[in-house]
Image (cartoon, rainbow, N blue to C red):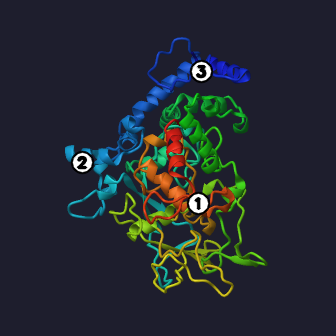
Amino acid sequence: MSSSQFLVCLLGAFALGGLSSCTTPDVDPAADTTGQSEAELASSARAAAGKKLFQHALPNTNGRSCATCHVLDEDTALLPQSVEARLASNPQDPLFNRLDADDPNAATPTYEHLKKGLVRIVLPLPANMDVIDVQGNVITPADRKISVWRGVPSIADTAITGPYLVDGRASTLEAQAQAAIHDHSQGGDVAQRTLGLIADFERSVFTSGRARFVSTLLEAGVPLANIPIPEDFMTLTPQEQRGRDVYAAACEACHGGPTKSQIVNRPVHDSLFSALKPDGNILFTVVPGQGPVRVLEPRPNNEFLLIGFGFFSYMGQLGLVPTFNASVELPRYRFRFYTDGTRQHPVTDLPPIPVTASGNPLDLNPALDENGAPIIGPNLFPQWFTTDPGRALITGDPLDFEAFDVPSLRGVSRTAPYFHDNSFATLPEVLTVYSQGVLPFIPTMNLPPVHPSEVPGGAPESLSVAQKQDLLTFLRKL
């Protein structure tokens, strides 16, 4: 069935209320092209050519190709266990370039970060930001660049998502490919035709026929709001159905729509962003009868989330949470934000110096101010440093501090570990983190922590053991 026939079939099937007459196969650039139009044949040929470019290192690079890190048989991600195996079998693999060594200047490089699936990302500071130390002294590097460690995202379903990378710094796949060639393959500028072919291949890779269905309609010009959610037409087991109900209550606000990456509940999103005082702590106002209430900063045009990803890494580095990446040292930064690029008029410092109830700077219980409001930064807890400022490193906006892009949950069960820096190794761990450390702190979700923890002495959870298992079953279906 050609793409045009497939689209007509799908539209007709949805008009009749079902999908029984249509199939939704994943795209394979090498598949039989019988019955395809000239345009479709050209598209298939471009994707096939792009796949070859994706797999092979380009001239004048360090030997790395796109597939060096976006491994084709690992759902185009980078699995930590495969890194260990590759290092053991071939230390000369292009993956093990000094760029991503723990210390690029070491006499004998080691790769413990890479073994966690992490690669070094070097980014320039926005003109209105400085790096500062604990005393507030400016310590910005001379080249005004800093590095962070991040996991390798899958390129599947990029036809229906964007912008790209966890901080959204690439607006197109072509721009992302060129940046990767510069930064990870140490190559120069590449012809737009080459970048276009690589992007065409990436747009042809899907986690399922359902994702391809969404892409087909988007490509045909159907507005996202008018595209049916394919999972609404799936045949589900009773447990999967229960899991979908849990998904609707706990996940869909931010992972909604046909892409499973769309923010569909703006009040939930906006409740995550607080106004900040000059010292970086959250601004509270005293409401009669309620006491101190956070002053929110609604962000109607912002599609990034601040839900504590960075704080989990912070706690892992302090040994307070057994994160997957806790055994490797992540950077420790503080930043000063200014009104503009002259850097003459400070706006705020983040994270703010903790003021705790006990006086112990590592205490997670904040002190209270004269109005009884907790003295806390954007993550709602005392925090000495950040391991990654997230979107703020692109925008220079303190409200974007430790905010990250919303990933699609399609194929999520196949791309462990999770979060921007591979903080958690398994999907069950992620669900527990959300149940204990995210959902209870978003009142607009209406999911109070009323269920006992699976771990004796652990924090109460928003989801029960059965609900998490049902949700896990549904997520594995996506």
Q: Is residue 384 above or below residue 67?
A: below
For residue 450, the mark is 1
The mark lying in front, picked from 2 and 1, is: 1
The mark lying in front, picked from 1 and 3, is: 1
Numbered disc 1: secondary structure: loop
Tag 2 or tag 3, which sits nearer the N-term? 3
Badge 3 amino acid = Ser
For residue 342, the mark is none
* Nearest to the observer: residue 301 or residue 257: 257
Numbered disc 2: secondary structure: helix
For residue 3, the mark is 3
Tag 1 or tag 2, which sits nearer the N-term? 2
**Is the C-beta separation of discs 1 and 3 under 8 Å?**
no
**Is the C-beta separation of discs 3 and 2 under 8 Å?**
no
- Residue in view at x 27 percent, y 48 percent: 84
Q: CA distance from mark 3 to mark 2?
A: 42 Å
Q: Is residue 352 above or below residue 145?
A: below
Q: CA distance from mark 2 to mark 1?
A: 46 Å
Quadrant in the rendering for residue 159: top right
For residue 87, the mark is 2
**Is the C-beta separation of discs 2 and 1 under 8 Å?**
no
Q: Position of residue 275 (x, y in %)?
A: 68, 71
Badge 2 amino acid = Leu
